[in-house]
Image: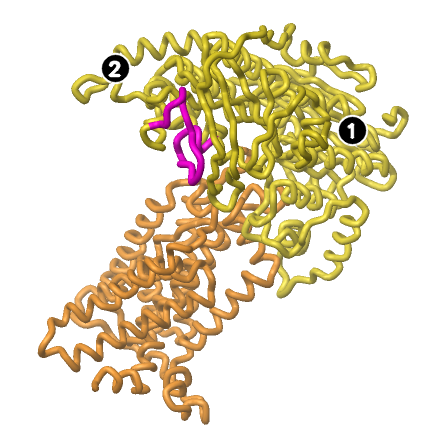
Chain colours: A yellow, B orange
C-alpha cells in the first residue's frame, strides 16, 4: 500500500542546473514521504540523473533548495548543497548507475571507505562487520565481505553499493537505473528487497525508463522531460500509454510487425561448439537457423553464451566443432572482413567500445568497414568530397543529430550513435543482421527507431538475429524465439512469457509448458 | 672461480644493500604517488634537488638529520608543484613530471653554482658513518650486509615497513588506494580526491628527496653534477616490477643493487679481456629482462594517469 499520510522526509524546491547552454534541470519540485517508493521516469537526457546528483551533492545547483528530515524529530532541515559528505550525514544514500566501487579493495573496505576516521594507526573493523552482518541478515543482501570487489558479479557489486548506503544509516535511498545491468530475476529480487525495506520505513527514489518495472514496483511516478517535471501520479492510478506520451511529449506507437513468409535460410549453425573468451560461457552444440524475411530473437539470462554467439557470427571466433553456413555456404575465413564481405551486418553490443571510433568523425566512422570500396577510395586516396556527401545524406536519412559529418563520434548521444551504426550497417543492404542488445540504454523514441529499421530490413529480405536481455523487446520484434541456456539454443514452442522465463532458467520446453 | 668468490664475499652484499638504499626511498615514493593515481616522473629531478639540499644544509652548518629534513622538504615542495599541476588542474602527468625533473635538476645546479661560484671540486662534509650493531654484525654475510650500514639505510628498511602498514592497514591507506582505482568511489563516500592525491604526491616526493640525500650524505660526501645518473628512472621501472607492493619494491631495489655491485666486481676481475661498458650495461639489461617477465602480469592502478574533476561525472 502506498503511504499517503506518512511524514515527508525530503523536499526539493526549484532546483535548477545549467551545463553551458543546456538547461539540464529547470526549477524542479519534488516531495518524498517516509516508506515511499518513487519512480523517476524520463527519456535519456531528461535530467533524472542530474537531479539526483544535486540531491547527493555531486553537483552544486544553480538555484533551489533541498530539505531533508535528518534527525529523530522528523523536522525538515536545509541540506548544505554540493557536498556528498553532508548528504551522507543527513541520511541520503545513492547507488550510482556506474558503480562507485574501488575494484582493488574488498567489499568491506569499500563499505567502510570514508565512514571511519581517516587518520588512525590501525583499523577497527569488528563492530563494523557486526553491523553489516546485521544489515545483511535483515535485508537478504548477502555478499562475501572479504572478496575483492573486482571478483564479484555485477549483481553482487550492486548489493555492495546498497550496503554502503545502508551502513551509513541511509533513510533515503536513490538508485540510478538499478536494473540496467541486472538479469530479470535479479531485478525482481532487488525490487522485492526494496519493497520490504520500504515497509520498514526506508524511502526510495529510483530512476528508470523501463515502464513495466515502474508500474510493478513503485508507489508514485514523477515524469521528467527536457529538464522539467511534466507529470506526477500515483502508480495505481497510472496508465501506460499516458505515461509514455508524457515522457516523449507525443504519441508513441510500436512499429507494426506485418506477417511475412520466410525465405531461404541465410544463417545456419549446426551443432557448433566454441569456448567462451575470458572464462565466460561458450557454445555447446548450438544449432540455429535464420531465414530471409525473418527476425529470430535469442532470449536468455546474460552470460549463457550470447557473447560467444555474437563473436562467432561477427567473425571474431571460429567454431571448434560444428558448422556455420551463410546462404548455405561456409565462409571463406572466420574473420570480420570475410563475414562483412559475405553479407553480415553487425550492430555490436557495446557501441562505444566496438561500434565507433570516438575520436574520428561521423563520415569516417561511416566508411570504416569498406575502405577499399572504389566509392570510398581510389589509388590509395580517400575520395573526401564523395565521402562527405554520402555522410550528409546518411545522417539525414537516419536522423543522426550531432555536429554534422565532421563532428567527432564520441560527442553523439547513445541514441544518435546507434543510428550512426544503423546507417553504416543498413546502407550495405546485408543479408544477415546481427543485432546484439540494439536498444540497450536507449530511450523510447530511439528504441522505436531501431525497431522500425530492423523491421524494414526484414521486409527488404534480410534475416535478423536479435540477441537481447529484454524479453519484452524480443517478444515485440521476433517471428521466432530461441532460448539460450548454458551454451545451447532451444526453440520456444510459443511466444509465452512465463514459459520462456522458465526455459531461461534451464527447464526444457516440455517441462516448461 | 671468481664469480663464486664474489657472491660469498661479505663486501659484495654490503655494497648491494648500499646501492639499493636510494632506490628503496625512490621506489617507495613513486609507489605512493602511483597508488593514488598519479605518475611522478619528477623523481629524477627530485633526487638531484634532494641530494643538493641535504648536502648544502649540512655544509651550511645544519646537523646531518637537519640535512635529511631539508632534503625531504625540498622533495615535498617539488612534489607539491607536480601535484598542483596534475591533480586539481588535471594536466598531463607525463609532461608535468618531465618538466618538474628539468626544473628541479636545474634549480639544484643553479643553487650549487650560486653558492660556490668558483670552486673546481665541491667542499666535503662529514657524512653518515656506518654503524656496527654488536653481535648481529658478526653473522657471516648477512651481518656486514645489514648491520654495518648507515642510519639512512636502516631508515629505508623502516620506511618500507611503514609504507606497507600504512597502505594495507590504515583507513588512510585504503582511501589512497581507492583514489588510484576509482576516484568516483572516494568522492561518493564524501572524501576529498584532491586532498588524497595531492597529499600522496607530496609525501611520496618527500621520500624521493631523502633518497637523493643518501647519495651526498652517506654514499659520498659531496654533490657532483650528474650524480643521480638515471636512478630515478630505474625507480619508475621498479614500481611496475613490484606490482605496486612495498615488499616487492624492497626486493626489486635490492636485486638491482646486487646486479650493480656484481658488475663492478666483474669489471675488476675481467676488465682486461672484456670492454667495461658491457658490465656497466648489465644491471640495466637484467632490470629490463626482470621487468618484462614481471610486468606482463602487473595490474595497474586503474585510475593511474586519469585526471579526475569534481562535479564532472
Residue nearest the observer in this picture, A275 or B109: A275
* Quarter of the image with the C terminus of chain A in it: top right
Q: Position of residue A271 (x, y in %)?
A: 49, 34
Q: Which residue sits at x=28%, y=72%? A: B259
Disc 2 sits on a residue from what chain?
A
Residue B167 lies in the magenta stretch: no
Q: Where is residue A288 in the image (x, y as percent from the top left)?
A: 52, 27
Residue B60 visible here: no
Query: Does A203 sit above or below residue A117?
Result: above
Q: In this rendering, would B187 be left or right of A137?
A: left
Image quadrant in which you'd find residue A192 = top right
Q: Mark 2 points at which residue?
A: A384
Q: Secondary structure beneath disc 2?
A: helix
Q: Secondary structure beneath disc 1?
A: strand
> Magenta segment, which residues?
A310-331
Q: Do the residues labelled 1 and 2 touch (CB within 8 Å)?
A: no
Q: Mark 1 points at which residue?
A: A37
Q: Where is residue A389 in the image (x, y as percent from the top left)?
A: 31, 9
Q: Where is residue B283 in the image (x, y as percent from the top left)?
A: 26, 68
Residue nearest the observer in this picture, A216 or A44: A216
Residue nearest the observer in this picture, A171 or A79: A171
Image quadrant in which you'd find residue A15 = top right
Is the same chain shared between marks 1 and 2? Answer: yes
Q: Which residue sits at x=67%, y=53%? A: A144
Alpha-carbon distance for marks 1 and 2?
54 Å
Amino acid at each position: 500500500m502506498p503511504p499517503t499520510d506518512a511524514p515527508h522526509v525530503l523536499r526539493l524546491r526549484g532546483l535548477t542546473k545549467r551545463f553551458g547552454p543546456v538547461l539540464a534541470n529547470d526549477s524542479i519540485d519534488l516531495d518524498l514521504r517516509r516508506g515511499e517508493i518513487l519512480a523517476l521516469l524520463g527519456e535519456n537526457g531528461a535530467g533524472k540523473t542530474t537531479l539526483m546528483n544535486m540531491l547527493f551533492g555531486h553537483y552544486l545547483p544553480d538555484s533551489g533548495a533541498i530539505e531533508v528530515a535528518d534527525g529523530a524529530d522528523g523536522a525538515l532541515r536545509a541540506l548544505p548543497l554540493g557536498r556528498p559528505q553532508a548528504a551522507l550525514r543527513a541520511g541520503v544514500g545513492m547507488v550510482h548507475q556506474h558503480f562507485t566501487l574501488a575494484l582493488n579493495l574488498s567489499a568491506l573496505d569499500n563499505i567502510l571507505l570514508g565512514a571511519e576516521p581517516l587518520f588512525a594507526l590501525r583499523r577497527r573493523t569488528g563492530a563494523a562487520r557486526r553491523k553489516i552482518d546485521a544489515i545483511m541478515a535483515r535485508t537478504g543482501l548477502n555478499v562475501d565481505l572479504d572478496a575483492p570487489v573486482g571478483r564479484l558479479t555485477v549483481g553482487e557489486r550492486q548489493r555492495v553499493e546498497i550496503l554502503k548506503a545502508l551502513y551509513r544509516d541511509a533513510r533515503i535511498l536513490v538508485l540510478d537505473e538499478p536494473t540496467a545491468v541486472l538479469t530479470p530475476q535479479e531485478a525482481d529480487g532487488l525490487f522485492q528487497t526494496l519493497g520490504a525495506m520500504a515497509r520498514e520505513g526506508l524511502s526510495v527514489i529510483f530512476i528508470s525508463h523501463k515502464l513495466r518495472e515502474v508500474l510493478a514496483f513503485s508507489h508514485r511516478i514523477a515524469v521528467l522531460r527536457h529538464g522539467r517535471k511534466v507529470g506526477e501520479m500515483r502508480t495505481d492510478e497510472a496508465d501506460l500509454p499516458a505515461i509514455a506520451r508524457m515522457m516523449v511529449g507525443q504519441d508513441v506507437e510500436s512499429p507494426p510487425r506485418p506477417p511475412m513468409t520466410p525465405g531461404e535460410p541465410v544463417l545456419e549453425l549446426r551443432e557448433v561448439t566454441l569456448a567462451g573468451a575470458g572464462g565466460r560461457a561458450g557454445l555447446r552444440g548450438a544449432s540455429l537457423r535464420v531465414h530471409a524475411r525473418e527476425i529470430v530473437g535469442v532470449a536468455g539470462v546474460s552470460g549463457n553464451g550470447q557473447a560467444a554467439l555474437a563473436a562467432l557470427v561477427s567473425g571474431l571466433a571460429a567454431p571448434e566443432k560444428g558448422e556455420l553456413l551463410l546462404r548455405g555456404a561456409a565462409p571463406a575465413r572466420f574473420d570480420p572482413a570475410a563475414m562483412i564481405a559475405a553479407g553480415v551486418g553487425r550492430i555490436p553490443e557495446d557501441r562505444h567500445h566496438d561500434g565507433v571510433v570516438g575520436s574520428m568523425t561521423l563520415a569516417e566512422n561511416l566508411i570504416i568497414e569498406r575502405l577499399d570500396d572504389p566509392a570510398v577510395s581510389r589509388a590509395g586516396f580517400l575520395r573526401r568530397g564523395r565521402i562527405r556527401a554520402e555522410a550528409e545524406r546518411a545522417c539525414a536519412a537516419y536522423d543522426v543529430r550531432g555536429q554534422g559529418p565532421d563532428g567527432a563520434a564520441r560527442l553523439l548521444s547513445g541514441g544518435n550513435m546507434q543510428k550512426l551504426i544503423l546507417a553504416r550497417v543498413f546502407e550495405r543492404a546485408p543479408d544477415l543482421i546481427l543485432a546484439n542488445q540494439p536498444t540497450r540504454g536507449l530511450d523510447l523514441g530511439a528504441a522505436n527507431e531501431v525497431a522500425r529499421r530492423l523491421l524494414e530490413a526484414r521486409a527488404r529480405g534480410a534475416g535478423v538475429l536479435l540477441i537481447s536481455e529484454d524479453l519484452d523487446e524480443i517478444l515485440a520484434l521476433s517471428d521466432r524465439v530461441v532460448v539460450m541456456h548454458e551454451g545451447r539454443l532451444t526453440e520456444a514452442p510459443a511466444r509465452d512469457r512465463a514459459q520462456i522465463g522458465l526455459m531461461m532458467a534451464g527447464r526444457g520446453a516440455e517441462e516448461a509448458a | 672461480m671468481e664469480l663464486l668468490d664474489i657472491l660469498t664475499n661479505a663486501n659484495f652484499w654490503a655494497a648491494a644493500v648500499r646501492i639499493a638504499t636510494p632506490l628503496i626511498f625512490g621506489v617507495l615514493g613513486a609507489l605512493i604517488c602511483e597508488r593514488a593515481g598519479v605518475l611522478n616522473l619528477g623523481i629524477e629531478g627530485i633526487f638531484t634537488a634532494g641530494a643538493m639540499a641535504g648536502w648544502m644544509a649540512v655544509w651550511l652548518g645544519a646537523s646531518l638529520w637537519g640535512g635529511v629534513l631539508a632534503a625531504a622538504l625540498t622533495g615535498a615542495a617539488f612534489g607539491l608543484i607536480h601535484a598542483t599541476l596534475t591533480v586539481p588542474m588535471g594536466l598531463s602527468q607525463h609532461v608535468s613530471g618531465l618538466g618538474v625533473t628539468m626544473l628541479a635538476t636545474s634549480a639544484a645546479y643553479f643553487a650549487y653554482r650560486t653558492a660556490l661560484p668558483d670552486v673546481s671540486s665541491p667542499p666535503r662534509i662529514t657524512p653518515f658513518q656506518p654503524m656496527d650493531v654488536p653481535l648481529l654484525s658478526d653473522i657471516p654475510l648477512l651481518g656486514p650486509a645489514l648491520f654495518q650500514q648507515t642510519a639512512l639505510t636502516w631508515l629505508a628498511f623502516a620506511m618500507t615497513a611503514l609504507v606497507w602498514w600504512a597502505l594495507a592497514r590504515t583507513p588512510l591507506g585504503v582511501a589512497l588506494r581507492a583514489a588510484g582505482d576509482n576516484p568516483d568511489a572516494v568522492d561518493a563516500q564524501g572524501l576529498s580526491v584532491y586532498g588524497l592525491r595531492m597529499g600522496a604526491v607530496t609525501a611520496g616526493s618527500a621520500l624521493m628527496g631523502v633518497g637523493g640525500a643518501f647519495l651526498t650524505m652517506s654514499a659520498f660526501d659531496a654533490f657532483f653534477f650528474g650524480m643521480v645518473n638515471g636512478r630515478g628512472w630505474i625507480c619508475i621501472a621498479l614500481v611496475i616490477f613490484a606490482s605496486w607492493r612495498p615488499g616487492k619494491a624492497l626486493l626489486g631495489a635490492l636485486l638491482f643493487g646486487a646486479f650493480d655491485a656484481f658488475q663492478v666486481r666483474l669489471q675488476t676481475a675481467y676488465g682486461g679481456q672484456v670492454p667495461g661498458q658491457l658490465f656497466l650495461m648489465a644491471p640495466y639489461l637484467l632490470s629490463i629482462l626482470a621487468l618484462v617477465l614481471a610486468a606482463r602480469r602487473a595490474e595497474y592502478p586503474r585510475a593511474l594517469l586519469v585526471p579526475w574533476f569534481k562535479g564532472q561525472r
